[in-house]
Image (cartoon, grey):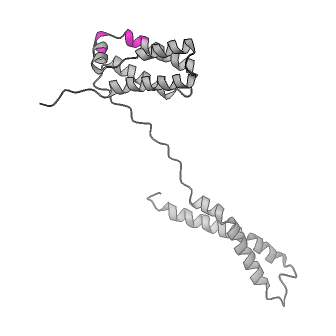
Amino acid sequence: MDDDGREPLRTFAVASLWSIVSALPSLVLHALELPRIEGDTADAGPLILSGLWFLCGGLTSPALGRILGAVPVVKALPPAERRLDHLPPAGALLVREAATIRGQLDALRFDEALQRAWELAGEVDRAGPEVRAVLEACGASLQAVREIAAARAGSAIPGSRLRGRLDAVLAEFERALSSPRSGLFR
């Protein structure tokens, strides 16, 4: 809603225009002066014309309700990005890549998602010593991606179960690195 007072003016203008438009059939019949409706002795003429006006207004009132009740579309904010300040930049990049693969898991073919996860596992293996230390401290690993790839090659497990396992592995990797473990309080 606007705070400058334009909304009540807009509502009044739309309602007035709607009232005039719904009265048009009655006004046209009045202007044509049809003998059965507009006779000198017929007292039912104004009743018929006003009834037609109310009938037209009643039939078009749902459209008026949609016009007056229209709410502007407001785009949602993007989801808040995880704070990964406790990780080195390369480690934060690995977490974001895992989240991206998980987010696109339903949109991608399973083989493409598995290929991207395999490449991510390779990046984890090639990570620098600082990142490796954080990975070991958090207990984060993508070794299960290699097991999923081996199961896919053997086709022993259905693709839907493998997709679920891949999703779980990536989620566990993200969770392990997203929430830092802190020491006990003294």
| Left or right position of 170 against 17 | left
- Give residue 55's position: percent from left, percent from top: 72, 72
Residue at 41% over, 12% down:
123
Q: How many marks?
A: 0
- The segment highlighted magenta reads 122-131
Residue 108 appears anywhere in the view: no
- Is residue 59 positioned above or below 3 on the image? below
Q: Is 16 part of what is drawn in magenta? A: no
Residue 155 appears anywhere in the view: yes
Residue at 54% over, 54% down:
71
| Left or right position of 119 against 22 | left
- Give residue 61's position: percent from left, percent from top: 65, 66
Q: Please, which residue is most extreme toward the right here?
A: 35
- Is residue 142 positioned above or below 26 on the image? above
Give 16 or 129, whichever is nearer the viewer.
Answer: 129
- Give residue 25's position: percent from left, percent from top: 77, 71
| Left or right position of 88 against 43 | left
Give 56 or 20, whichever is nearer the viewer.
Answer: 56
Residue at 42% over, 14% down:
121
Does the magenta stretch mainly form a helix, a strand or a loop? helix
Q: Please, which residue is most extreme toward the front here?
A: 156
